[in-house]
Amino acid sequence: MTAATVIRPLAPSEQIFAFSEVFVGYCARVSGRVDTSALAAAYEALVTAHPMLGAQLVPGEPSGHTLVTSGPPEIVLTVADGDPELLLTGAGPDQRRALGSVHVVRSATGASVTLLVHHSIADATHALHLYERLWQCYSTAVTGRVPELPPARQPQPVEDLLAARGITRRPVPGRAGPPRSAPPLPPPDALAVNDHDYPPLVTTRCRLSREHTGALVSYGHRTGVTVHSLVAAALLLTEAEARRLPVTGLQCSYSVDLRRRVRPAIGPAEGTNVLGFAGYRPAPGAVQTLTSLAHGVFGALREGLATGYVQQTPLQLPDTLAAPPANPSDTVMTTNWGRLPGLSGPAVRIDDFRTTMIAKPDPTGRRPPQPGGGTSIVTTYDSRLSIEIHHPPEFTAVQRSRIEHLRTLLTRL
């Protein structure tokens, strides 16, 4: 790397993804031939407009990371022949090289096209916005025209966006005094480079039909809950069975996009990780059904938003990171990436939309692995609900059982 220019240190809401080198990815599964030259031109236009994609992360003091740039942003695009279901074949993401990249895996009949973005600079909403712009540029480039995008403003951390809207850190209910002491972080030199490889991942997926998805939406309308709360309830019941625990012994934990939860609203690419956090633990003593749990999830979220608690949870991250790690055995992690837009492009047909999320083992011990090896990612594309779990291959059998249980719960309504 040549002499680097410092952009800024990462904020706590961004730093949590740097030690494990977390990347999130959106992928279109297409039929037809992908014009890789046009795709390269499209991605170059995207990086020119959003130069943070070509920036790097370097360790800083005492144990953080800093955004830097060194010369012109690097355009990282890989093309591999193979199974398009293996989205990252041939990819070698490295936060010391670039924070964004595009990866094509092609077969004789189709391909996958994945935009991979470091989670420190973009959450799912931001990354999807970038993917839409990439596809727009590709549609331009494949016709022989030069794609261009207006330059975007540098995205801000959620801490700054909330402060500009008068949202400040409040004491956490039930916490008296400073957070409990925790084991110290490893020394900075031990965190300078995460030498772990990205573990191999496979995807187990529950994808509902349009009919079942529509029925789920209708059921939510009739009973006064959201599809997200129904999925969260189904996950709680599924994990209770898989972990052989009472459902009251589990807590559902998930992120909440704050962009439309504050005033003025925040644009898709104005912030890096504009995420609050919410959770729900079922109360003991009552019969726990899918519908009652969904009402519990929805009610807890509505209350947390009404009181402003969810909106200021990102500001609690320093305390959260200083406290002992949460117990993964009683936590059900899920993230809802929302409804994905319909995309189209010349000479290719988009058949499906996929997600991916990769991370290295966390040397700080602050991100213990989930039982079963993966966080559930919820999306809706082409009017079909999808729940994807990305996990190491050794968990395939147990994840298939989970997925079938989820499918049964969500379709029998």
Image: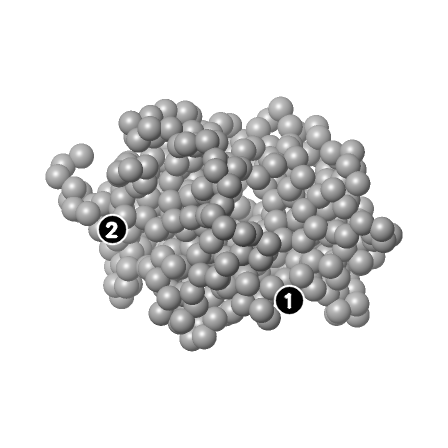
Q: Quarter of the image for the N terminus: give it.
A: top left
Vertical placement of residue 222 versus 240, above or below: below
Q: Which of the 4 quarters of the picture holds residue 336? A: bottom right
Residue at image coords 42%, 26%:
197
Q: In this view, does 175 lie to the left or right of 143?
A: right
Query: What amino acid is labelled 2 in the image?
Result: Arg
**Label 2 crowd bin: few (<14), some (14–19), many (20+), radius 10 Å:** few
Q: Which of marks 1 and 2 is nearer the N terminus?
A: 2
Q: Position of residue 98 (x, y in %)?
A: 29, 41
Q: In the rendering, which numbered label is found on residue 303?
A: 1
Q: Which of the two discs, 1 and 2, sits closer to the camera?
A: 1
Q: In this view, does 49 lie to the left or right of 322?
A: left
Q: Is residue 249 visible?
A: yes
Q: Is residue 292 left or right of residue 116?
A: right
Q: Quarter of the image for the C terminus: give it.
A: bottom right
Kindly identify which residue carries mark 2.
8
Q: In the rendering, which numbered label is found on residue 329?
A: none
Residue at image coords 45%, 42%:
322
Q: Which of the 4 quarters of the picture holds residue 99? A: top left
Q: Where is residue 105 in the image (x, y as percent from the top left)?
A: 45, 37
Query: What amino acid is labelled 1 in the image?
Result: Glu
What secondary structure is marked by label 2?
Answer: strand
- Say whether marks 1 and 2 touch (CB < 8 Å): no
**Label 1 crowd bin: few (<14), some (14–19), many (20+), radius 10 Å:** few
Q: Where is residue 346 in the image (x, y as percent from the top left)?
A: 43, 57
* Gap in angstroms between the C-alphas marked 1 and 2: 35 Å
Residue at image coords 80%, 49%:
284
Residue at image coords 67%, 53%:
280
